[in-house]
């Protein structure tokens, strides 16, 4: 039985399942268009140099290929999935005829383009489930042309392979909650959600704490449905239990190597070093510093508003704490660095508090790694991405970021209705935003950008209207006034954060506009 | 409205399967555990298989909570003197190098000496991999690193590891000379910025 919004006896949190059909053909066409655009971008970008963590991933793949096991990077330990995938494609024979040796690098980029089809499909499905068929088509179009997301398919970062299982985990969780709301068993969906999150955790540590939080969400909803404590425990524990069980082989391998298990990866200490310290580090702009300094120019990071990121040498900046380098044990060093960072935060709460504003602003910046590549002049000289397409790509990537962020926020505050969909989407968003309180840059927004796109699509398709929106009960009019006030306040807050990051964004944008420091 | 969940043990079946998998995994892990002393002995045993020696060295190097001279000096020297290319290359990675950190100024001496020694020999896949494993790791000069891998190096290295073939020597000489010059230029810029920055 499905509870209906118009049924006065239905509890407010009960969400009816969407009544509208999935626009399969429309979604398929948009996904194909998005994949074609990504393939074209890849073709235009090659041969594309590698940057920072891309080099470290390849170093790890080379070591795995040469020695037969993964090395850590001394300062951090990444989850094993992406390095393993690169090593499979770069082995002597490649994988299923794809790659082999150096060809494995571009083969990895091709697999990422192919995998993006799943991301596009799931993004549209989220918009369909949260809003309507019309929103699903808007989401598909936004996803297809949102270049900051598209560009990751030709970067050597784990994001493009991480997104399909991560979104799959959220999707199966949403289906499970729908089934539970409709008094139907959902064990298989919860298991599938756990398996998908487990796969995602092999690629990126990002959902490590989100998975138990979502388990808690399932348990709380079970209690609100009067399912009882035992049943709440059973349902709530299943997703994290399955996800962490899939991690067991890697965790136990790490226990053998380090003497203690590792869930997914160990990067917290290094992030604390960057996040709870005197200076503000943002890798959107840090990579731009070197060419600028070589040209005798100021750094983009140095342009930050002093109120939120005081420059080095400012009397308000407390002394920085150094990384622990003495211990050879990666995990112990991580733990010690975390303790140092927390001690720093306790000692300088004012500095830490005001620099958090900069972190939040860095998370919602319309800048992106696409623009960063353009600013570095990183695409090949003969590529259209360095020539005629550079400025259109820059404008489109910044514009779609602004649309996705602003409309995504308004979609969350104005259009999204109460129910399982809102609980899942806002949990993921709030969690991602919380992680940005430690360290931040545009790349850390990527895991939840499909969710933001779905929310933005809801707002674009329906505005703040209550019609066409299936999820949950329609509130009285005063509730609408409150929602509009929340939307206005949210938009103002976002505008304020864009003002905070404007000096860096405008400087980096100008550099990308010129295609380098020239 | 409470969903139908069935009764008895069946709704808990996925939990039980996970618990069973965990028990089996822990049992396997425990049965296959190698002590640090065993790992080090295997790593230093010239008669052991190369894969076992590498894994033993990895365990001994990563478990140590303080710098261990048995890894930093003993094992590094044994591997660098070996005829097996992969052992030599492994001694140049961060696994072994981390046991030198803080013990001396500059890059780890045994590894730096080894690279200086092979610099006069013709370029081979092994020399290329040894150079890249040492010079392109994460970390600073104290670890022996100079810059990260670039695309050409990554391609050459993956081909060298897959097929044992290195690019022509003159190509590599010109490439590494160019990167060294670029690294010197960057170092000079960073130094000048640091000295001009208000303290």
Image: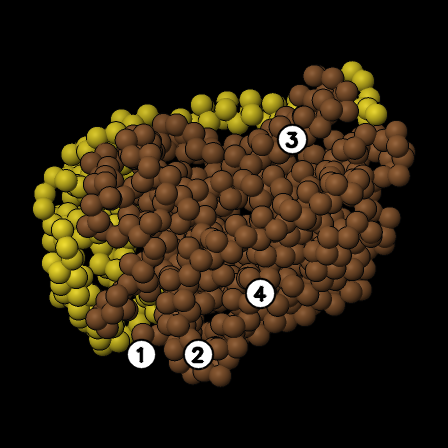
Both marks 3 and 1 on one chain: yes
Mark 3, secondary structure of its residue = helix
Residue neighbourhood size for the residue with mark 1, other residues' Cα within 10 Å, grouped as few (<14), some (14–19), many (≥20): few
Question: Disc 3: which chain?
Answer: A
First in sequence: mark 4 vs mark 1: 4
Q: CA distance from mark 4 to mark 3?
A: 31 Å
Q: Earlier in the sequence, mark 2 or mark 3?
A: 3
Select label 4 or label 3 by which is in front.
4
Would residue B91 appear left or right of A379 to someone viewing this image? left
What residue sits right under mark 4 in the picture? A400
Q: Name the residue carrying label 2.
A: A386
Q: Which mark is residue A217?
A: 3
Residues B164 and A236: in front is: A236
Q: Residues within 10 Å of mark 4 (few under 14, many from 20)?
A: some
Mark 2 or mark 4, which is nearer to you? Answer: 4
Label 1 sits on a secondary structure element that is loop
What residue is drawn where x is 59% and y is 57%? A406
Residue found 47% across the figure and 53% down from its top: A497
Q: Which chain is yellow?
A: B
Mark toward the viewer: 2 or 1 = 1
């Amino acid at each position: 039985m499905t509870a209906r919004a118009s049924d006065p006896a239905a509890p407010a949190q009960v969400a009816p399942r969407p009544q509208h059909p999935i626009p399969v053909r429309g979604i398929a066409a948009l996904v194909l268009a998005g994949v074609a655009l990504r393939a074209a971008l890849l073709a235009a970008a090659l041969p594309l140099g590698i940057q920072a963590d891309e080099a470290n991933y390849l170093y790890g793949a080379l070591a795995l290929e040469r020695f037969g096991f993964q090395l850590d990077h001394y300062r951090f330990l990444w989850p094993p999935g992406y390095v393993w995938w690169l090593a499979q494609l770069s082995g002597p024979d490649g994988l299923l005829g794809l790659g082999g040796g150096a060809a494995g690098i571009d083969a990895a980029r091709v697999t990422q383009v192919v995998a993006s089809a799943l991301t596009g499909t799931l993004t549209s499905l989220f918009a369909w489930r949260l809003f309507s068929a019309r929103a699903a088509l808007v989401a598909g179009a936004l996803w297809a042309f949102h270049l900051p997301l598209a560009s990751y398919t030709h970067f050597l970062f784990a994001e493009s392979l991480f997104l399909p299982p991560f979104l799959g985990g959220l999707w199966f969780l949403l289906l499970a909650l729908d089934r539970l709301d409709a008094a139907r068993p959902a064990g298989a969906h919860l298991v599938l959600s756990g398996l998908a999150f487990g796969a995602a955790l092999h690629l990126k540590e990002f959902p490590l704490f989100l998975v138990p939080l979502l388990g808690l969400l399932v348990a709380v909803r079970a209690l609100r449905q009067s399912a009882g404590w035992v049943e709440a425990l059973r349902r709530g524990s299943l997703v994290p239990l399955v996800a962490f069980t899939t991690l067991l082989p890697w965790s136990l391998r790490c226990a053998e190597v380090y003497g203690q298990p590792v869930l997914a990866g160990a990067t917290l200490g290094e992030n604390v070093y960057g996040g709870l310290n005197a200076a503000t580090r943002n890798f959107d702009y840090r990579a731009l510093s070197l060419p600028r300094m070589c040209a005798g120019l100021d750094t983009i990071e140095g342009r930050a508003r002093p109120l939120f990121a005081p420059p080095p040498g400012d009397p308000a900046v407390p002394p920085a704490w150094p990384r622990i380098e003495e211990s050879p044990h990666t995990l112990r060093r991580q733990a010690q660095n975390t303790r140092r960072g927390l001690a720093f935060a306790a000692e300088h709460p004012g500095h830490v508090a005001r620099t958090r504003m900069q972190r939040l602003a860095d998370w919602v910046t319309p800048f992106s790694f696409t623009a960063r590549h353009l600013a570095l002049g990183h695409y090949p000289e003969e590529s259209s991405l360095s020539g005629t397409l550079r400025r259109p790509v820059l404008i489109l990537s910044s514009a779609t970021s602004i649309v996705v962020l602003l409309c995504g926020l308004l979609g969350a505050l104005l259009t999204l209705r109460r129910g399982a969909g809102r609980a899942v989407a806002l949990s993921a968003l709030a969690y991602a935003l919380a992680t940005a309180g430690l360290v931040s840059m545009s790349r850390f927004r990527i895991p939840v950008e499909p969710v933001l796109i779905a929310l933005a699509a809801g707002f674009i398709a329906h505005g703040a209207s209550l019609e066409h929106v299936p999820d949950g009960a329609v509130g009285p009019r005063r509730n609408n006034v409150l929602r509009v006030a929340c939307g206005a306040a949210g938009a103002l807050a976002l505008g304020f954060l864009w003002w905070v990051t404007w000096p860096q964004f405008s400087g980096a944008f100008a550099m990308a506009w010129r295609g380098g420091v020239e | 409205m409470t969903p139908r969940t069935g009764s008895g043990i069946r709704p808990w079946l996925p939990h039980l399967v996970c618990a069973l998998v965990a028990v089996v995994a822990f049992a396997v892990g425990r049965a296959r555990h190698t002590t640090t002393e065993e790992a080090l002995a295997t790593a230093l045993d010239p008669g052991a298989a190369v894969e076992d020696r590498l894994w033993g060295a990895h365990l001994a190097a990563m478990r140590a909570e303080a710098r261990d001279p048995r890894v930093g000096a003993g094992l590094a020297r044994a591997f660098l003197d070996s005829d097996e290319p992969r052992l030599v290359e492994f001694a140049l990675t961060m696994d072994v190098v981390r046991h030198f950190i803080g013990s001396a100024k500059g890059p780890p001496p045994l590894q730096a000496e080894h690279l200086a020694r092979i610099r006069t020999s013709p370029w081979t896949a092994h020399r290329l991999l040894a150079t890249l494993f040492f010079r392109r790791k994460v970390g600073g000069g104290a670890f022996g690193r100079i810059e990260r891998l670039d695309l050409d190096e990554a391609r050459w290295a993956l081909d060298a590891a897959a097929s044992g073939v290195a690019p022509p020597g003159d190509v590599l000489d010109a490439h590494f000379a160019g990167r060294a010059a670029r690294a010197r230029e960057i170092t000079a810029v960073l130094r000048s910025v640091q000295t001009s920055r208000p303290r």
